Image (cartoon, grey):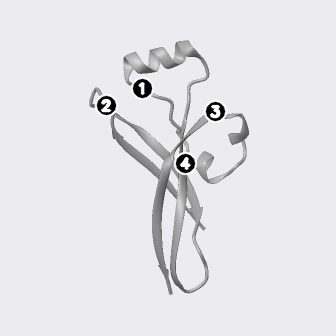
Amino acid sequence: PQIVLSVYGPDFFGHDVVRGYGAVHVPFVPGRHKRTIAMFVPESTSRLQQLTSWFTGRRPEFTDPKVVAQGEGREVTRVRSQGFVTISFNVM
């Protein structure tokens, strides 16, 4: 099993935009586990798309969370690293 994170927050204009996506496998071993998840955001492929998304406040985002969980098809997607999220698991 995996946990898929989609983090959203306001931009400069107050629009709710994606701040990052990430995924991590849930550990099976009992105990306390801490995982650091590298977050990323999709990027526009052209300058015109970047300018249009800046004016409209609509940035690129994934419509299906399976894209984040699976590696299939992501090698052709342009993304930018956007920090880290640390998560703790208590597995029984």
Label drawn at residue 58: 1
- Say if mark 3 contacts mark 2, CB within 8 Å: no
Q: Amino acid at mark 1?
A: Arg
Q: Residue at x 53, y 67 (%)?
A: 35
From mark 3 to mark 4, how far is it between C-alphas?
16 Å
Which image quadrant: the N terminus?
bottom right
| Residue at far top of view | 48
Between discs 3 and 2, the one toward the N terminus:
2
Q: Amino acid at mark 3?
A: Arg
Q: Which residue corresponds to mark 4? A: 65
Label drawn at residue 78: 3
* Residue 14 location (% of width, % of height): 27, 31
Q: Nearer the viewer, mark 1 or mark 3?
A: 3
From mark 1 to mark 4, how far is it between C-alphas?
18 Å
Q: Nearer the viewer, mark 2 or mark 4?
A: 2
* Residue 33 location (% of width, % of height): 52, 77
Q: Which residue corresponds to mark 2? A: 15
SS at mark 2 in the image: loop
From mark 2 to mark 1, how far is it between C-alphas?
8 Å
From mark 2 to mark 4, how far is it between C-alphas?
21 Å
